[in-house]
């Protein structure tokens, strides 16, 4: 199976105090292998619109070649308000997830 990565969020619009669940589901990877995942964010209000890496983690997939990464951040207002395109990559495999839009209002 070809490795795949799917990014989902519980919210497309976030405001102060909103708790979001972000999930990246990996499947079809080499069983029991360790891969580096990176979370990318691009938005005009952040880093002059340049790609901004917010996640850079090594994860170990299970014996079925799957892994679920999840985080539940609460918007505390530190993210500049605006619209962001977000996706994950495994650079060693030249693999990208789908891209989602998150709007901070």
Image (tube, grey):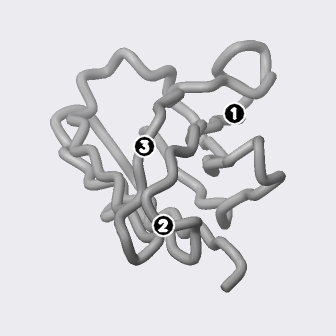
Which residue occupies the foreground of this view, 93 or 100?
Answer: 93
Q: Is residue 52 above or below residue 8?
A: above
Q: Is residue 57 visible?
A: yes
Q: Is residue 12 visible?
A: no
Mark 3 vs mark 2: which is more N-terminal?
A: 2
Q: Is residue 84 above or below residue 30?
A: above
Point out residue 89 in the picture as x, y percentages from the top left corner: 68, 48
Disc 3 to disc 1, how far (Cα)?
Answer: 26 Å
Quarter of the image for residue 68 reads: bottom left
Please name the residue that numbered disc 2 is placed on. Answer: 31
Quarter of the image for residue 98 reads: bottom right
Q: Is residue 40 left or right of residue 12?
A: right
Please name the residue that numbered disc 1 is placed on. Answer: 43
| In this rendering, the label closer to the viewer, 3 or 1 | 3
Please name the residue that numbered disc 3 is placed on. Answer: 59
Q: Is residue 45 left or right of residue 71?
A: right
Count of marks placed on residues: 3
Disc 2 to disc 1, how far (Cα)?
Answer: 35 Å
Which residue occupies the foreground of this view, 100 or 5?
Answer: 5
Q: Is residue 75 left or right of residue 101?
A: left
Query: Dot 1, how many residues are within 10 Å of its Cα: few (below 14), some (14-19), or many (20+)?
Result: many
Mark 3 vs mark 1: which is more N-terminal?
A: 1
Badge 3 element: strand
| In this rendering, the label closer to the viewer, 2 or 1 | 2
Q: Residue at x 27, y 44 (%)?
A: 71
Point out residue 7 in the picture as x, y percentages from the top left corner: 51, 63
The answer to whether the residue labelled 3 contacts the one labelled 1, judged by CB atoms less than 8 Å apart, is: no
Disc 3 to disc 2, how far (Cα)?
Answer: 12 Å
């Amino acid at each position: 199976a070809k490795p795949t990565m799917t990014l989902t969020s519980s919210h497309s619009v976030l405001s102060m105090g909103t708790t979001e669940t972000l999930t990246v589901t990996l499947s079809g990877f080499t069983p029991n292998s360790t891969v580096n995942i990176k979370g990318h964010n691009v938005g005009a209000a952040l880093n002059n619109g340049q790609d901004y890496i917010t996640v850079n983690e090594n994860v170990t997939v299970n014996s079925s070649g799957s892994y679920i990464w999840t985080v539940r951040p609460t918007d505390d207002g530190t993210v500049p308000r605006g619209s962001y395109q977000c996706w994950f990559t495994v650079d060693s495999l030249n693999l990208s997830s789908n891209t989602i839009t998150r709007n901070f209002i």
